[in-house]
Amino acid sequence: MARPTHQTSTTSGTASGPGDTAEIQRLVEDLDGMLSRLRLGAIRERLDALLEEASRRQLNLREALAWLCAAEVASKEQRRLSMAMTIARFPFVRTLEGFEFEAQPSIDPGKIRDLATCRWVANGDNVVLLGPPGVGKTHLEVALGREAVARGYTVQFTTAMELLGSLLKAQQQGMLEARLAQYAKPKLLIIDELGYLPLEPQAGHLFFQLISRRYEQGSVLISSNRSVEEWDEVFGDQVVAAAILDRLMHHSQVVTIRGDSYRLREKRRSGLFRPRAGGPSLAGVGGVPPPTPAKEA
Ligand code: ADP
Ligand code: MG
């Protein structure tokens, strides 16, 4: 390997003679090639700036190496996170910081913060979120799902309709096994909106097969606007509903949200819907971009 002859941290190599300049050029190219080969893209792309910064901070060689590695690790982690978020297919971005607990007093913030540690995901337990429309079920699912992604778990978000439609289609095409295996893969499967729309007669059996497949292997986070007593009706079959609940509830936590729709509350506050006395007092949804109407659940 070419030995560095220059003392500066930059690659410009100014005051040297023509021979030195050629050698520095070769060194720069060699280094560039090695960084590519080692897939150290962040160091490679920002090498001059990183070296300059290391020199400005008067880091010794070991410190400078650690500083370069930290930049690479941070960049790789950022890439992993962004890819895992894409794979999870969340319908929008929602975070726990953006959840106004004061607006939903029936939710125990301590319980949600405990869920955010994702111990239940590590254990393969389930969480069932129950409550009427607009109370923040999907918001919490996305926020908890993002926490799980951040902790390195594989996550997939889907709706009950999408999931069952996909299983049904796979069954018709003789590909049910493969599709079940696909949905069994992520460590956390989030199933949104069970009970909003009537299900096909076979849906209960397919759902049972999926829940059995995931039982004690991977976690399910499921939300429904119907109480579990009404799941007989949701699945149109008492026996199947009981079998699903038996497995789903075995290692599970249930969070029941009672209260007003946040959407209607927002409308009330903006004066579009039955104005209330008192005026605006609470801050907006901190830390979260304003909801995009087109993406609303
Ligand atoms: P659900 O799934 O229960 O029907 P959503 O989670 O879709 O309700 O909530 C509707 C909208 O209101 C979403 O944009 C969500 O981010 C917002 N929202 C609901 N509850 C809260 C809350 N407590 N704090 C902040 N935003 C909320
Ligand atoms: Mg929802």
Image: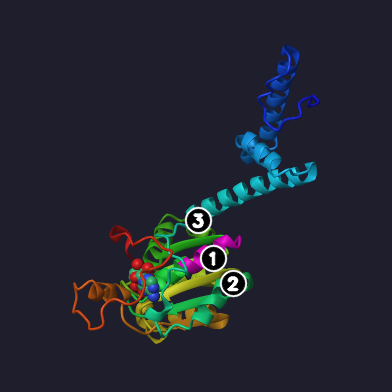
* Residue 128 counted in the magenta span: no
The mark that comes first in sequence, 2 or 1, is 2
| Distance of label 2 from label 1 (alpha carbons) | 8 Å
Could you say which disc has been placed on residue 147 in the image?
1
| Distance of label 1 from label 3 (alpha carbons) | 10 Å
The mark that comes first in sequence, 1 or 3, is 3
Q: Which residues are magenta?
A: 143-153
Q: Main secondary structure of the magenta part?
A: helix
Q: Secondary structure at mark 1?
A: helix
In x, y percent, where is residue 132? Answer: 33, 79
* Of 48 and 294, the residue lying toward us: 48
Q: Residue at x 53, y 61 (%)?
A: 155
Quadrant that contains the N terminus: top right
Is 215 on the left or on the right of 158, as rendered?
Answer: right
Q: Residue at x 32, y 63 (%)?
A: 296
- The type of residue carrying mark 1 is Glu
Is 190 on the left or on the right of 132, as rendered?
Answer: right
Residue underneath mark 2: 117
In x, y percent, where is residue 150? Answer: 57, 61
**Ligand 1 sits in quadrant:** bottom left
* Residue 152 counted in the magenta span: yes
